[in-house]
Amino acid sequence: MGIQERKERERERRRQQIIVAAKRVFSKKGFNRATMEDIAQEAELSPGTLYLYFKNKDELYASLSLRILQYLNIRLDHVVKEEGLAPAERMQALKEAIYDVYQFDPLILINLFHLQSSETLENLSPELFDDIQNLTLRSLERITALFRSGIEGGLFETYNPEVLAELFWSLFSGMVLWEESKRIFENDNYFLKDTLDMAFGIFLRGIGRPEEGPFAASPHRLGVAVDPMPSK
């Protein structure tokens, strides 16, 4: 191993050390109360060392999201590329993949949701911003492909698959944030998996073709009229 390679490995090891410490501090104190000094102390490094790797707390906070976005894309890739699945089975695989991403690291996933709706993104370096943006767009493209496949397979009405992907992601992020907020006040009243199963089921039935397939729209059962998006 050459000197340059050893230096790069050491730099990456130190970077991961800081990220692990930051996750602990953010978990205990939250983003607003945590300081770079707290993270440096947790990592057993000087504050100045942290700034060699991350220009500010926003950038360190955002860097935590890269890992969960990378895992999200791995899971979605698997669902998209898995052979021999019927359209309905692929939707079930999508639901399982999304919940698996939550279980992989709930704290970082919640941080990602907060990050996507905050001004923190504006304070990031162009490189980190591009990484987060590209991974986010790539995940939405894969979810879009899955809904497009469902439409082409006759499972769903002919809605815009990009809109369906955004609705699906919004439903997921909203339910996770809501259930997590409930846990703060009612620790014994936490039903995320059951809630997600019900929410996704209602959503998929709502966009299903009437009386066709496992996600067929059922206005009587749902108590709403289900009409396809009007054409322009």
Image (cartoon, rainbow, N blue to C red):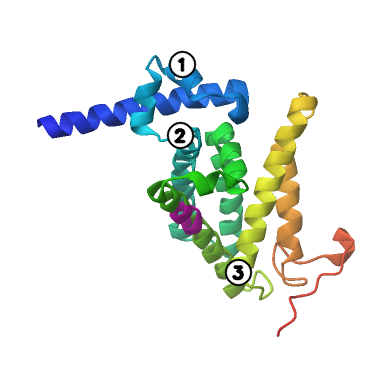
**In the image, is residue 148 above or below residue 128?**
below
Which is more N-terminal, label 3 or label 1? 1
Q: Which amino acid is tagged 3?
A: Pro
The residue that disc 3 covers is 161
Which is more N-terminal, label 1 or label 2? 1
Dividing the image into 4 quarters, which one contains the C terminus?
Answer: bottom right
- Where's residue 216, x and y in %? 74, 66
Which is more N-terminal, label 2 or label 3? 2
Gap between marks 3 and 2, in whole Å?
38 Å
Gap between marks 1 and 3, in whole Å?
45 Å
Q: Which amino acid is tagged 2?
A: Asn
Asked whether, in this view, residue 57 is left or right of residue 188, the answer is: left
Q: Residue 42 got which mark? A: 1
For the question of whether residue 186 can be seen, the reply is no
Residue range (magenta): 133-138
Q: Which residue is drawn at 69% across and 73% down?
A: 157
Name the magenta segment's main secondary structure. helix
The residue that disc 2 covers is 56
